[in-house]
Amino acid sequence: MIAILKRETTPEQKAHLIDWLKHMNLDVHISDGDEFTVLGLIGDTTRVDMELLNSLEIVESVKRVSEPFKQANRKFHPDDTVVSIGDVKIGGGHFAMIAGPCSVESEEQIIEVAQAVKAAGADILRGGAFKPRTSPYAFQGLKGEGIRMLLEAKQATGLPIITEIMTTRSLDLFEDVDIIQVGARNMQNFDLLQELGKTHKPILLKRGLANTLQELLMSAEYIMSEGNENIILCERGIRTYEHYTRNTLDLSAIPVLHELTHLPVVIDPSHATGKASLVPSMAAAAAAADADGIMIEVHNNPSRALCDGAQSLTPEQFDQVNKKVQKIREAIR
Amino acid sequence: MIAILKRETTPEQKAHLIDWLKHMNLDVHISDGDEFTVLGLIGDTTRVDMELLNSLEIVESVKRVSEPFKQANRKFHPDDTVVSIGDVKIGGGHFAMIAGPCSVESEEQIIEVAQAVKAAGADILRGGAFKPRTSPYAFQGLKGEGIRMLLEAKQATGLPIITEIMTTRSLDLFEDVDIIQVGARNMQNFDLLQELGKTHKPILLKRGLANTLQELLMSAEYIMSEGNENIILCERGIRTYEHYTRNTLDLSAIPVLHELTHLPVVIDPSHATGKASLVPSMAAAAAAADADGIMIEVHNNPSRALCDGAQSLTPEQFDQVNKKVQKIREAIR
Amino acid sequence: MIAILKRETTPEQKAHLIDWLKHMNLDVHISDGDEFTVLGLIGDTTRVDMELLNSLEIVESVKRVSEPFKQANRKFHPDDTVVSIGDVKIGGGHFAMIAGPCSVESEEQIIEVAQAVKAAGADILRGGAFKPRTSPYAFQGLKGEGIRMLLEAKQATGLPIITEIMTTRSLDLFEDVDIIQVGARNMQNFDLLQELGKTHKPILLKRGLANTLQELLMSAEYIMSEGNENIILCERGIRTYEHYTRNTLDLSAIPVLHELTHLPVVIDPSHATGKASLVPSMAAAAAAADADGIMIEVHNNPSRALCDGAQSLTPEQFDQVNKKVQKIREAIR
Amino acid sequence: MIAILKRETTPEQKAHLIDWLKHMNLDVHISDGDEFTVLGLIGDTTRVDMELLNSLEIVESVKRVSEPFKQANRKFHPDDTVVSIGDVKIGGGHFAMIAGPCSVESEEQIIEVAQAVKAAGADILRGGAFKPRTSPYAFQGLKGEGIRMLLEAKQATGLPIITEIMTTRSLDLFEDVDIIQVGARNMQNFDLLQELGKTHKPILLKRGLANTLQELLMSAEYIMSEGNENIILCERGIRTYEHYTRNTLDLSAIPVLHELTHLPVVIDPSHATGKASLVPSMAAAAAAADADGIMIEVHNNPSRALCDGAQSLTPEQFDQVNKKVQKIREAIR
């Protein structure tokens, strides 16, 4: 970490700051110039509060040379992390297709969709039981009952399941869930992250609506620092001024995260775009950019298609997307 | 609520949709045109899932004529809500100045700052005990001990206190806290909001980093729908591409929220700008735009000024800001 | 176009508005409800100023059912536009790879790069002669001399050339240029667009830093409305809060634009990401999402590599990217 | 300027870079550490292309210690610039109220509005003759005829006039215009800026929709570097994800710009918010934050009020806003 001091810093202030930094077990390398003084901080700088340092009146600017995350950092862990969910693996060359409905609606529905997506090549079944909704008056999911139905679908098809958690208070209900999803709104719910770090469950951590990739990695670090290293990162679109798509899918997250971290990266084109017609090409693009997995919303209820989200594919459409994705994966090897 | 159907909608699809809407106890007023069909939905449309409706393949677009929030809505509650904290009142013409340090560091520090800001005219003392931090390795606050120190400072000065909660699991510790703050990162932690709705504590709800004003009001609605109407809204800057300031303070939130809701609106120029030099003019601007309160970071530790945030004012600076704010409030009456 | 009137609209105001709309040769279909009145406007609504209409006090909201662009609209022109540049074609299944240096630096440099990218499979040579720079003190390009050098490179290799125009005042210099590029900063320089509409040159129109896809199409419409239909749209990243990449590449622009318009879509991953290491995977993703072309920065000067942009690939890297792109294009057929 | 080199930089690369920097007449102060090398660049660093330097493979990061703008920089020109327009002054404690309609519609209209705003205390008359419009089919203004009408209104009232230029090709028409406005879409139309720099007209330069304050100052520098120092900066809202207001007014621009530059700062709350009901409080806030001027849209045509923008105030409303603004200005002295 490098701190540049303002020209008007007094020798006392400088000494005071250096003293404080050394107190944090850092070596301080001082370089005085006519126009500025540069302090090089050597040691475990992850504990240094960069914002605090930056905000000191005598500090012109602070620059990290090393990233503030350790356990998620590829520098200290060059090999790809492979997350295992039964026989399914994600990361390190292993690719998983995750599919299923937005919400679990009934046992019949979830089993039917599970069978359809399995037939079309899905590796993991998704389905929402606890639904974060902007409005307190909107349908909030079947909750515990929804998880029970997902487990029935798992039994019927053998597909492992992923579903979202919203509070530590419902953690018990997730005992048999294979992957616990942390939604975008909870990416910086630090208390939840720490509790999940105490489990050994695979966690799929979604990027927040307005969070940087570094913040995403810091949130992964919250989980890892408690002992759980089974983390899958998920890009699901960020909020921008463009409103033709629901969010803006940031596919550059794939190569950036692959550079910065060893954790696998999954793309969710359904929530990112909000439109079924855009999902196939964004899934293809994610595969071409070497994502470790793709998560797609699929429904299977022609008679009630009316009420299904326009962001969901039919099983037939999903089947075609999956075939294309697999062909692209072969083409880039 | 108005739904515009696509031209290619079949009579069966239309009938199917109307049926579904009537099931939700809505009256449906149908207007067929050559180019489109318009459905006017009359009744309690807050329960209608606008996103779902909008995502149907046959729906061109949906437009709310009435807002999706009820209890927070000025239309149904024209008079300003006045939140009372002991003798201090916020809203309905009552203005409160909230001041104190970013973090509680020691009993001595918080009492000293409390006395200083009281002397300078503050109405309420702020101070962080639980600190949400991007990094798991950064200082997370003194937690329960910090709340105890705030209560000491309250006793010493008579100032009511406000401090941030991060999880329902620490709710017991907040029993004697006067105002519970929900931070920007937790604005859509719906479980936390609902639990706070079951208390009768005044809640200061901060706008999320990338949340719309409507989403802020929906989060207030989450609290209110559980029975707690003592809500103070707080604008603290939104995330944009501009990086000279830490965030972009959206002062238009004041008149917009005053139009849409009866709840009081407080501005936090310290976190919004991240720079002490910008706080005085933004506090003045907030007062001129008729904010119901202003929350300012103040430190009082010249000997350790080195480590204080550049966004904090000294008590002397705060005193001047407060005087200016009061003069502006008189000027706009 | 549909306009929803507020409940409190008086009969006189309504009559006045309808009169005004009929004056614009629109049929007005009126639907009165208890809660609102809906006006359906039928006819050529591209001339209706939606912002103006929306801003009327009696108007609750306005919704376009048809898009505000006509000549660029796929509805009125279902077949893909194919832009021909000599033997090279873009659009309608024809794909072009555009490559070359950020700036033309010397005749030797541009000819060397041109030969290298041609050997690696490029179809078109890019190179900046007029460089839009944030600072008036930065290098602004070789200008007319740079165009002359590009033409030498064209003669040496047979590759058609593309280079950026910054003002109508230099239009004469572009007489022999094959494709004129309009940069992101000039996307809404309407005077420039109109003048380019009077030529018959192929125009590559880049999306502005904070412009919506609809605004991009309206800018294309400016050119087309003057008679020039040879337009290639280009996504080059939008400005967001994320600063790890220079901009955020919005690849969903490809399927969205293919739905809305018949004009070809080219992706520029070099400017979007600002980092060479991210270019290969973003080029692959663009190909998988069925872009009609990709534009990549390539340099060829190992001895001066020091001063080449980190967003440029070497000819060898470009060769590999091109091979991968071609394989992906085959895979998605 | 400080450049931090990566650890893996070879001695040859380092020597090569230092050589290149010295070629630009910079002194280079070298500080070698175990983990990094820091180069301090001393001299006229405004000519250094920071982006280029930053993009070199051996460079970890670059930090400007001094800003990249010179003539606009308060450090080199501590006194406020006062722009004089006849008897009206803006900056250095002088405040101007600018008012008038969005577009000039007729001689009668513009004279009537001019008389009304003059009576209410306006110092300068605004009115659009050339209108930048997203759609080529929308009304583009009365152009030269509109300027003629503005000059009639000036003669009738004595108010100096401000109106927008869109291309250098119409510069002749602006000979008698008092202040030439550069709109947000043209903030980085560098050719236009340079041509305006060759005139001696006061220029009101609006911040672009997605431009940083530093980019705004660099655009001012483009004008100043050609010899014209009569520049007024204008904040008119930036584009964010929030869509309740048309744009997000960034009032922190006032204190930030006052710190960085000596140029006066004007606020346009009408375009920023897009809603008349929000203009009075944002004008009050701008005055409290010590803006040097405020520009407000005012119409005066009750019989055609139907077609007037909802962002325009009536002369009566403007009169009240102006009174409040003046009271606030007194309160903050």
Image: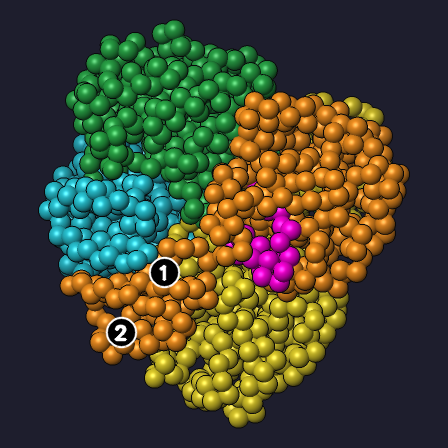
Chain colours: A yellow, B orange, C cyan, D green
How crowded pointer 2 is (Cα within 10 Å; few <14, some 14-19, many 20+) is rated as some
Residue D211 in the image, given as x and y percentages of width and height: 44, 36
Observer-nearest of D188 and C306:
D188
* Residue at x 65%, y 48% (from the top left corner): B204
Q: On screen, A207 above or below D47?
A: below
For the residue pair C28 and C46, the one nearer the viewer reads as C28
Give x and y (percent) for residue C31. 22, 58
**Count of marks overlaid on the render:** 2
User: Which span is picked out in magenta?
Assistant: B215-241
| Residue type beneath disc 2 | Lys
Q: Residues within 10 Å of mark 1 (few under 14, many from 20)?
A: many
Rendered view: A159 above or below D154: below
Secondary structure category for the residue under label 2: helix
Judged left or right of residue D88, residue C61 is left
Chain hosting mark 1: B
> From the image, which quarter does the C terminus of chain C lie in?
bottom left
**Which amino acid type is marked by label 1?**
Met
Q: Which residue is mark 1?
A: B1
Please, which residue is most extreme toward the bottom here?
A: A156
* Residue C248 visible, this orientation: no
The chain identifier of the residue carrying mark 2 reads B
Q: Which residue is mark 2?
A: B14
